[in-house]
Image (spheres, helix red, strand yellow):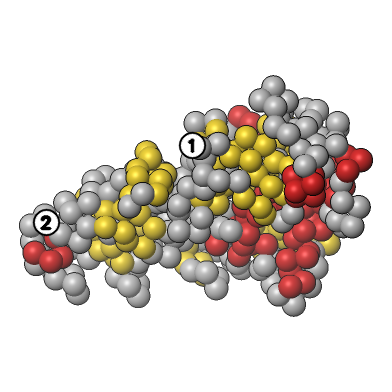
Amino acid sequence: MKKNILIVTAALAISLGLSGTALAAGWQQNETGRWYERDDKTYPVNTWLQDPEDGRWYHFDMNGYMQTGWIQDGGKHYYLDIVTGAMWANTTTPDGYRLDASGAWIQGAGTAAQEKKAGWQEDNVGRWYQNSDGSYVKNRWKEINGSRYYFDESGYAAVGFADINGEEYYFSSRGVLQTKNFTIDGEVYIVNSRGVILDVVDEWDYESGQYTYNSGNNKTTSSSNKNNNNTTANSQKESSSAAEDGHNREYAEAVIDLVNQEREKKGLSPLEMNETLMGGCEIRAEELVEKFSHTRPDGSSCYTVVQSEYGSSYIGENIAEGYTSPEHVMNGWMNSSGHRANILKKEYEEIGVGCYVYNGRKYWVQLFGAQK
Protein backbone atom coordinates (compact mmCIF):
# COMPACT_ATOMS: atom_id res chain seq x y z
CA MET A 1 0.00 0.00 0.00
CA LYS A 2 1.82 3.03 -1.24
CA LYS A 3 1.42 6.76 -1.49
CA ASN A 4 2.36 8.28 -4.82
CA ILE A 5 3.25 11.97 -4.72
CA LEU A 6 5.63 14.12 -6.70
CA ILE A 7 9.29 13.08 -6.66
CA VAL A 8 11.44 16.19 -6.27
CA THR A 9 14.96 14.77 -6.18
CA ALA A 10 16.47 17.08 -8.75
CA ALA A 11 18.42 14.56 -10.80
CA LEU A 12 15.51 12.22 -11.19
CA ALA A 13 13.61 13.75 -13.98
CA ILE A 14 9.81 13.52 -14.07
CA SER A 15 8.06 12.26 -17.20
CA LEU A 16 4.81 13.79 -18.40
CA GLY A 17 4.08 10.82 -20.60
CA LEU A 18 0.40 11.53 -21.35
CA SER A 19 0.64 11.12 -25.08
CA GLY A 20 -2.44 10.03 -26.93
CA THR A 21 -5.32 11.25 -29.03
CA ALA A 22 -7.30 13.66 -26.88
CA LEU A 23 -10.44 14.81 -28.67
CA ALA A 24 -12.48 16.20 -25.78
CA ALA A 25 -12.50 16.62 -22.02
CA GLY A 26 -12.93 13.40 -20.08
CA TRP A 27 -11.19 10.04 -19.88
CA GLN A 28 -8.29 9.46 -22.28
CA GLN A 29 -6.18 6.35 -22.76
CA ASN A 30 -2.97 5.18 -24.43
CA GLU A 31 -0.89 2.02 -24.17
CA THR A 32 0.46 3.10 -20.77
CA GLY A 33 -2.82 3.81 -19.01
CA ARG A 34 -5.81 6.11 -18.48
CA TRP A 35 -5.97 9.76 -17.43
CA TYR A 36 -8.65 12.41 -17.09
CA GLU A 37 -8.30 15.50 -19.27
CA ARG A 38 -10.09 18.70 -18.30
CA ASP A 39 -11.57 21.26 -20.68
CA ASP A 40 -8.40 23.36 -20.50
CA LYS A 41 -6.27 20.33 -21.50
CA THR A 42 -4.79 19.99 -17.99
CA TYR A 43 -5.18 16.85 -15.93
CA PRO A 44 -4.92 15.83 -12.26
CA VAL A 45 -1.48 14.78 -10.98
CA ASN A 46 -0.79 13.25 -7.55
CA THR A 47 -4.34 13.97 -6.43
CA TRP A 48 -7.93 12.78 -6.28
CA LEU A 49 -10.69 13.57 -8.76
CA GLN A 50 -14.43 12.87 -8.52
CA ASP A 51 -15.77 11.90 -11.92
CA PRO A 52 -18.70 14.23 -12.72
CA GLU A 53 -20.35 11.42 -14.66
CA ASP A 54 -20.37 8.51 -12.19
CA GLY A 55 -19.60 10.37 -8.95
CA ARG A 56 -16.80 7.91 -8.07
CA TRP A 57 -13.40 8.97 -6.74
CA TYR A 58 -10.16 8.23 -8.60
CA HIS A 59 -6.50 8.89 -7.79
CA PHE A 60 -3.73 9.79 -10.26
CA ASP A 61 0.02 9.20 -10.00
CA MET A 62 2.99 11.51 -10.57
CA ASN A 63 2.59 11.18 -14.34
CA GLY A 64 -1.16 11.80 -14.27
CA TYR A 65 -2.17 8.19 -14.89
CA MET A 66 -5.10 6.63 -13.01
CA GLN A 67 -3.95 4.29 -10.26
CA THR A 68 -5.32 0.92 -9.22
CA GLY A 69 -4.87 -1.29 -6.15
CA TRP A 70 -3.63 -0.02 -2.80
CA ILE A 71 -2.33 3.52 -2.36
CA GLN A 72 -1.53 5.65 0.67
CA ASP A 73 -2.52 9.30 0.91
CA GLY A 74 -2.43 11.63 3.89
CA GLY A 75 -1.34 8.82 6.18
CA LYS A 76 -4.33 6.65 5.23
CA HIS A 77 -4.62 3.60 2.98
CA TYR A 78 -7.16 3.36 0.18
CA TYR A 79 -8.09 0.64 -2.28
CA LEU A 80 -8.78 1.44 -5.95
CA ASP A 81 -10.56 -1.09 -8.14
CA ILE A 82 -7.98 -3.00 -10.16
CA VAL A 83 -10.07 -2.69 -13.34
CA THR A 84 -11.98 0.60 -13.16
CA GLY A 85 -9.72 2.49 -10.75
CA ALA A 86 -12.72 3.67 -8.70
CA MET A 87 -12.19 3.91 -4.94
CA TRP A 88 -13.88 1.28 -2.79
CA ALA A 89 -15.62 2.37 0.43
CA ASN A 90 -17.59 0.88 3.32
CA THR A 91 -16.72 -2.67 2.34
CA THR A 92 -14.01 -5.34 2.54
CA THR A 93 -11.19 -5.52 -0.03
CA PRO A 94 -10.32 -8.74 -1.91
CA ASP A 95 -7.32 -9.23 0.42
CA GLY A 96 -9.42 -8.93 3.57
CA TYR A 97 -9.11 -5.31 4.76
CA ARG A 98 -12.10 -3.35 6.07
CA LEU A 99 -12.72 0.13 4.61
CA ASP A 100 -14.78 2.89 6.21
CA ALA A 101 -17.32 5.14 4.50
CA SER A 102 -14.57 7.51 3.34
CA GLY A 103 -12.69 4.63 1.69
CA ALA A 104 -9.88 4.57 4.27
CA TRP A 105 -8.62 1.28 5.69
CA ILE A 106 -9.75 0.74 9.29
CA GLN A 107 -6.49 -0.01 11.08
CA GLY A 108 -6.67 -3.33 12.89
CA ALA A 109 -9.43 -4.59 10.62
CA GLY A 110 -7.62 -7.37 8.83
CA THR A 111 -5.73 -10.58 9.53
CA ALA A 112 -2.64 -10.46 11.74
CA ALA A 113 -0.50 -11.54 8.80
CA GLN A 114 -1.82 -8.70 6.67
CA GLU A 115 -1.16 -6.12 9.37
CA LYS A 116 2.47 -7.16 9.87
CA LYS A 117 3.85 -7.20 6.34
CA ALA A 118 7.21 -5.57 7.08
CA GLY A 119 10.18 -5.29 4.75
CA TRP A 120 10.64 -4.56 1.06
CA GLN A 121 7.56 -3.89 -1.05
CA GLU A 122 7.40 -3.24 -4.79
CA ASP A 123 4.97 -1.97 -7.41
CA ASN A 124 5.19 -0.81 -11.02
CA VAL A 125 6.80 2.48 -9.93
CA GLY A 126 9.56 1.20 -7.66
CA ARG A 127 10.55 -0.31 -4.29
CA TRP A 128 9.94 0.95 -0.77
CA TYR A 129 10.59 -0.32 2.74
CA GLN A 130 7.49 -0.85 4.87
CA ASN A 131 7.47 -1.05 8.65
CA SER A 132 5.30 -3.55 10.54
CA ASP A 133 2.80 -0.82 11.44
CA GLY A 134 2.17 -0.08 7.76
CA SER A 135 4.26 3.11 7.70
CA TYR A 136 7.29 3.37 5.44
CA VAL A 137 10.64 5.12 5.24
CA LYS A 138 10.61 8.36 3.27
CA ASN A 139 12.74 11.43 2.62
CA ARG A 140 15.83 10.04 4.36
CA TRP A 141 18.71 7.56 4.28
CA LYS A 142 18.44 4.09 5.76
CA GLU A 143 20.93 1.23 6.10
CA ILE A 144 19.38 -2.19 5.48
CA ASN A 145 21.40 -5.41 5.72
CA GLY A 146 24.68 -3.54 5.33
CA SER A 147 23.68 -1.48 2.26
CA ARG A 148 22.63 2.17 2.18
CA TYR A 149 19.45 3.38 0.48
CA TYR A 150 17.80 6.74 0.04
CA PHE A 151 14.03 7.01 0.06
CA ASP A 152 12.40 10.02 -1.60
CA GLU A 153 9.41 11.88 -0.20
CA SER A 154 7.09 9.37 -1.86
CA GLY A 155 8.92 6.59 -0.01
CA TYR A 156 10.47 5.03 -3.12
CA ALA A 157 14.13 3.94 -3.08
CA ALA A 158 16.22 6.13 -5.37
CA VAL A 159 17.67 4.40 -8.45
CA GLY A 160 20.20 5.61 -11.00
CA PHE A 161 21.69 9.08 -10.60
CA ALA A 162 20.16 11.23 -7.87
CA ASP A 163 20.91 14.72 -6.61
CA ILE A 164 20.35 14.78 -2.84
CA ASN A 165 20.90 18.02 -0.95
CA GLY A 166 23.24 19.31 -3.65
CA GLU A 167 25.40 16.16 -3.85
CA GLU A 168 25.18 13.56 -6.61
CA TYR A 169 24.93 9.82 -5.97
CA TYR A 170 24.33 6.67 -7.99
CA PHE A 171 22.07 3.81 -6.93
CA SER A 172 21.71 0.36 -8.49
CA SER A 173 18.45 -0.80 -10.08
CA ARG A 174 17.58 -2.26 -6.65
CA GLY A 175 18.36 1.01 -4.88
CA VAL A 176 21.76 0.13 -3.35
CA LEU A 177 24.10 3.14 -3.03
CA GLN A 178 27.30 2.80 -5.08
CA THR A 179 30.28 3.51 -2.78
CA LYS A 180 33.10 2.49 -5.12
CA ASN A 181 34.22 3.93 -8.46
CA PHE A 182 32.08 2.62 -11.34
CA THR A 183 31.97 2.83 -15.14
CA ILE A 184 29.03 3.67 -17.40
CA ASP A 185 29.32 4.14 -21.18
CA GLY A 186 33.09 4.55 -21.14
CA GLU A 187 33.17 7.08 -18.31
CA VAL A 188 34.49 6.34 -14.82
CA TYR A 189 32.63 7.97 -11.93
CA ILE A 190 34.87 8.74 -8.97
CA VAL A 191 33.06 8.40 -5.62
CA ASN A 192 34.09 8.77 -1.99
CA SER A 193 33.29 6.42 0.88
CA ARG A 194 29.93 8.15 1.41
CA GLY A 195 28.98 7.49 -2.21
CA VAL A 196 29.22 11.14 -3.32
CA ILE A 197 30.27 11.43 -6.98
CA LEU A 198 33.37 13.61 -7.03
CA ASP A 199 34.31 13.52 -10.70
CA VAL A 200 33.69 11.90 -14.08
CA VAL A 201 36.66 10.87 -16.21
CA ASP A 202 37.20 9.13 -19.53
CA GLU A 203 37.85 5.41 -18.98
CA TRP A 204 41.05 5.51 -21.08
CA ASP A 205 42.57 8.26 -18.94
CA TYR A 206 41.60 6.49 -15.74
CA GLU A 207 43.04 3.11 -16.73
CA SER A 208 46.20 4.57 -18.28
CA GLY A 209 47.05 6.55 -15.17
CA GLN A 210 46.61 9.92 -16.90
CA TYR A 211 43.93 10.90 -14.39
CA THR A 212 44.37 12.28 -10.87
CA TYR A 213 41.68 13.77 -8.69
CA ASN A 214 42.19 17.22 -7.23
CA SER A 215 39.45 18.52 -4.93
CA GLY A 216 40.08 22.04 -6.20
CA ASN A 217 39.67 21.09 -9.84
CA ASN A 218 37.18 18.34 -10.47
CA LYS A 219 38.03 17.77 -14.14
CA THR A 220 41.73 17.03 -14.62
CA THR A 221 41.84 14.84 -17.71
CA SER A 222 43.91 15.75 -20.74
CA SER A 223 42.02 16.00 -24.03
CA SER A 224 45.14 15.01 -25.94
CA ASN A 225 45.04 11.62 -24.23
CA LYS A 226 41.43 10.85 -25.13
CA ASN A 227 40.73 7.61 -26.95
CA ASN A 228 40.28 8.76 -30.55
CA ASN A 229 38.37 5.57 -31.39
CA ASN A 230 35.48 6.73 -29.20
CA THR A 231 32.81 7.89 -31.66
CA THR A 232 31.08 9.98 -28.99
CA ALA A 233 34.20 11.66 -27.63
CA ASN A 234 33.23 15.13 -28.80
CA SER A 235 29.90 15.07 -26.96
CA GLN A 236 31.42 13.46 -23.84
CA LYS A 237 34.09 16.10 -23.32
CA GLU A 238 33.36 19.19 -21.28
CA SER A 239 34.35 21.93 -23.70
CA SER A 240 34.93 25.48 -22.58
CA SER A 241 31.58 26.51 -24.08
CA ALA A 242 29.79 23.74 -22.17
CA ALA A 243 30.82 25.31 -18.87
CA GLU A 244 29.42 28.75 -19.80
CA ASP A 245 25.93 29.84 -18.83
CA GLY A 246 23.34 29.95 -21.59
CA HIS A 247 21.93 27.54 -24.18
CA ASN A 248 24.12 24.67 -25.40
CA ARG A 249 22.86 23.71 -28.86
CA GLU A 250 25.68 21.20 -29.37
CA TYR A 251 24.58 19.19 -26.35
CA ALA A 252 20.93 19.44 -27.37
CA GLU A 253 21.62 17.99 -30.81
CA ALA A 254 23.82 15.28 -29.28
CA VAL A 255 20.84 14.17 -27.19
CA ILE A 256 18.76 13.85 -30.38
CA ASP A 257 21.43 11.58 -31.86
CA LEU A 258 21.36 9.43 -28.72
CA VAL A 259 17.56 9.27 -28.80
CA ASN A 260 17.64 7.98 -32.35
CA GLN A 261 20.30 5.42 -31.45
CA GLU A 262 17.96 4.05 -28.77
CA ARG A 263 15.02 4.02 -31.19
CA GLU A 264 17.11 2.23 -33.82
CA LYS A 265 17.86 -0.54 -31.30
CA LYS A 266 14.10 -1.12 -31.02
CA GLY A 267 13.47 -0.98 -34.77
CA LEU A 268 11.69 2.39 -34.52
CA SER A 269 11.86 5.24 -37.02
CA PRO A 270 14.25 8.09 -36.13
CA LEU A 271 12.81 11.39 -34.94
CA GLU A 272 13.32 14.51 -37.04
CA MET A 273 14.55 17.65 -35.33
CA ASN A 274 11.82 20.30 -35.40
CA GLU A 275 12.82 23.94 -34.90
CA THR A 276 9.51 24.88 -33.29
CA LEU A 277 10.01 22.15 -30.70
CA MET A 278 13.68 23.17 -30.32
CA GLY A 279 12.63 26.74 -29.57
CA GLY A 280 10.01 25.56 -27.11
CA CYS A 281 12.60 23.42 -25.34
CA GLU A 282 14.94 26.36 -24.95
CA ILE A 283 12.17 28.37 -23.32
CA ARG A 284 11.18 25.46 -21.08
CA ALA A 285 14.81 24.77 -20.06
CA GLU A 286 15.15 28.36 -18.83
CA GLU A 287 11.85 28.04 -16.96
CA LEU A 288 13.13 24.98 -15.08
CA VAL A 289 15.58 27.22 -13.25
CA GLU A 290 12.61 28.99 -11.68
CA LYS A 291 10.27 26.00 -11.38
CA PHE A 292 11.29 22.37 -11.94
CA SER A 293 7.92 21.06 -13.04
CA HIS A 294 5.80 20.19 -16.06
CA THR A 295 3.70 23.19 -15.05
CA ARG A 296 5.16 26.47 -16.29
CA PRO A 297 5.95 29.35 -13.90
CA ASP A 298 2.72 31.11 -14.99
CA GLY A 299 0.70 28.03 -14.00
CA SER A 300 -0.06 26.82 -17.52
CA SER A 301 0.72 23.39 -18.97
CA CYS A 302 4.16 22.79 -20.48
CA TYR A 303 2.47 22.16 -23.84
CA THR A 304 1.44 25.81 -24.16
CA VAL A 305 5.03 26.70 -25.01
CA VAL A 306 4.45 25.40 -28.57
CA GLN A 307 0.66 25.25 -28.71
CA SER A 308 0.16 28.25 -31.00
CA GLU A 309 2.74 27.11 -33.58
CA TYR A 310 2.73 23.34 -33.37
CA GLY A 311 -0.50 21.45 -33.94
CA SER A 312 -0.22 17.91 -32.63
CA SER A 313 -2.38 14.99 -31.60
CA TYR A 314 0.60 13.46 -29.82
CA ILE A 315 2.98 15.40 -27.60
CA GLY A 316 5.10 14.61 -24.56
CA GLU A 317 7.79 16.16 -22.39
CA ASN A 318 10.78 14.87 -20.42
CA ILE A 319 12.74 17.14 -18.07
CA ALA A 320 15.91 16.74 -16.02
CA GLU A 321 18.25 18.80 -13.89
CA GLY A 322 21.87 18.39 -12.81
CA TYR A 323 23.06 15.89 -15.42
CA THR A 324 26.46 16.85 -16.82
CA SER A 325 26.45 15.56 -20.41
CA PRO A 326 24.15 14.23 -23.14
CA GLU A 327 25.17 10.65 -22.27
CA HIS A 328 24.60 11.30 -18.58
CA VAL A 329 21.06 12.64 -18.98
CA MET A 330 20.09 9.98 -21.52
CA ASN A 331 21.26 7.28 -19.14
CA GLY A 332 19.00 8.77 -16.47
CA TRP A 333 16.00 8.99 -18.78
CA MET A 334 16.48 5.48 -20.19
CA ASN A 335 16.59 4.08 -16.64
CA SER A 336 13.19 5.62 -15.87
CA SER A 337 10.16 3.81 -17.27
CA GLY A 338 8.12 6.95 -17.89
CA HIS A 339 10.88 8.83 -19.70
CA ARG A 340 11.93 5.74 -21.66
CA ALA A 341 8.31 5.32 -22.82
CA ASN A 342 8.36 8.84 -24.29
CA ILE A 343 11.72 8.27 -26.01
CA LEU A 344 10.57 4.98 -27.56
CA LYS A 345 6.97 5.91 -28.35
CA LYS A 346 6.33 4.76 -31.92
CA GLU A 347 3.74 7.47 -32.64
CA TYR A 348 6.25 10.30 -32.28
CA GLU A 349 7.81 11.71 -35.46
CA GLU A 350 9.64 14.86 -34.34
CA ILE A 351 11.71 16.04 -31.40
CA GLY A 352 13.17 19.14 -29.82
CA VAL A 353 15.79 19.27 -27.07
CA GLY A 354 17.03 22.11 -24.90
CA CYS A 355 20.07 22.30 -22.65
CA TYR A 356 20.33 25.47 -20.56
CA VAL A 357 23.24 26.16 -18.21
CA TYR A 358 22.68 28.43 -15.23
CA ASN A 359 25.42 29.02 -12.63
CA GLY A 360 27.18 25.98 -14.08
CA ARG A 361 24.18 23.67 -13.59
CA LYS A 362 22.46 22.10 -16.60
CA TYR A 363 18.71 21.94 -17.19
CA TRP A 364 17.41 19.59 -19.89
CA VAL A 365 14.12 19.34 -21.79
CA GLN A 366 12.83 17.02 -24.50
CA LEU A 367 9.60 17.71 -26.42
CA PHE A 368 8.18 14.97 -28.65
CA GLY A 369 5.42 15.40 -31.18
CA ALA A 370 3.63 14.17 -34.28
CA GLN A 371 1.72 16.65 -36.41
CA LYS A 372 -1.53 15.01 -37.46
Q: Position of residue 108 (x, y in %)?
A: 7, 57
User: Quick one: SS at disc 1?
Assistant: loop
Q: Position of residue 297 (x, y in %)?
A: 59, 33
Give the crowd class for mark 1: few <14, some 14-19, many >=20 residues within 10 Å: few
Quickly name the residue at label 2. 106
Which quadrant of the figure contains the N terminus? bottom left
Residue at mark 2 to residue at mark 1: CA–CA distance: 41 Å
Closer to the N terminus: mark 2 or mark 1? 2
Q: Position of residue 139 (x, y in %)?
A: 37, 39
Q: Nearer the viewer, residue 333 or 109?
A: 333
Q: Nearer the viewer, residue 304 or 343?
A: 343
User: Quick one: SS at disc 2?
Assistant: loop
| Residue at horizontal 22 percent and vertical 65 percent from the top | 88
| Residue at horizontal 62 percent and vertical 55 percent from the top | 333
Tell me, yes or no, whether the two marked residues, 2 and 1, touch with CB atoms within 8 Å: no
Residue 129 vertical placement versus 293 (above, below): below
Amino acid type shown at disc 2: Ile
Q: Quadrant of residue 103?
A: bottom left
Q: Nearer the viewer, residue 258 or 174?
A: 174
Q: Nearer the viewer, residue 273 or 323?
A: 323
Quickly name the residue at label 1. 194
Amino acid type shown at disc 1: Arg
Q: From the viewer's perspective, is 217 left or right of 29?
A: right
For the question of whether residue 333 can be seen, the reply is yes
Residue 372 vertical placement versus 255 (above, below): below
Q: Position of residue 33 (x, y in %)?
A: 48, 68
Give the crowd class for mark 2: few <14, some 14-19, many >=20 residues within 10 Å: some
For the question of whether residue 367 can be seen, the reply is no
Q: From the viewer's perspective, is 256 left or right of 329?
A: right
| Residue at horizontal 39 percent and vertical 58 percent from the top | 127
Q: Which circle marks residue 169 in the picture? A: none
| Residue at horizontal 42 percent and vertical 55 percent from the top | 61
